Image (spheres, rainbow, N blue to C red):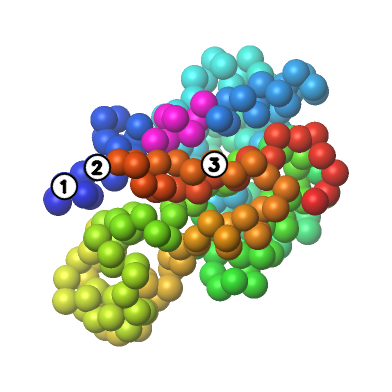
Amino acid sequence: MNLIYALQDADNPNSLSSRFRKARARRVVELVEAAFAERGEVRIIDLGGEPEYWRRLYDRNWLEARKVRITLVNPQRFEVDDPLFEAAVGDACALPEHPDLGFDLVHSNSVVEHVGDWPRMEAFAAEVRRLAPRYYVQTPYFWFPIEPHFSSPFFHWRSEQARARLLLKRRHGFAPRAGDMGQAMRDVQHARLLDKQQFRFLFPDAEHIDEKAVGLTKSLIAIRRGPAGLG
């Protein structure tokens, strides 16, 4: 395991990734507290979320005291045996089964870069802004030199063709060595990082925060603190 990969290991509480997640959690705590003060309960929809993320970063007693209930939306069916969570199968870019402002908070951590091409990113952002008066969205920054999914310096600044050829040769970060060009291209296109102008266009009604590492912007965060109408 290389050093960059180790620094990104979410299972290691001392890794760079874990430290950033804990810092982000404090921002989410503020949003939860504000929603609880208004309604006496907090309904969260987490687009692409997993139970372990919440269990690792947030105190269970605190979540229960704030009467938090979390709907986890993912494209594949999965089971959750925990009353804190509801597992829902859905496309985060189109969730018509959920009404406008049907939740108190939308949460999304490193998901928008995985939903597909630009029209799907726009659809995802529209759902985020529609579903709750408050939202928290985080995504890796395109111009940070280390690509987080492939754990390689400058990897994402190469052409898709060049990246695919590299994946045919060896493993890169979380992506194994590709068995053929088809797999390599699917892996390459699975993550499409955004720059600041793109991210701010998608979330124009948010407060935008640059998360920095060694003086460079590493991730982009958009927060709408609400309450607000549909933006």
Q: Earlier in the sequence, mark 1 or mark 3?
A: 1
Amino acid type, callout 3: Ile
CA gap, disc 3 to disc 2?
A: 22 Å
Quarter of the rendering containing residue 185: bottom left
How dense is the environment of label 3, judged by Cα within 10 Å: few (below 14), some, or many (20 and up)? few
Tell me if label 1 and label 3 are in contact, CB under 8 Å. Answer: no
Amino acid type, callout 1: Leu
User: To which residue does mark 1 refer?
Assistant: 3
Query: Is residue 58 found inside the magenta-colored segment of the image?
Result: no
CA gap, disc 1 to disc 3?
A: 27 Å
> Which label sits on residue 209?
3
- Front position in the image: 121 or 60: 121
Tell me if label 2 and label 1 are in contact, CB under 8 Å. Answer: yes
Amino acid type, callout 2: Leu
Question: Which range is magenta?
Answer: 20-26
Tell me if label 3 and label 2 are in contact, CB under 8 Å. Answer: no
How dense is the environment of label 2, judged by Cα within 10 Å: few (below 14), some, or many (20 and up)? some
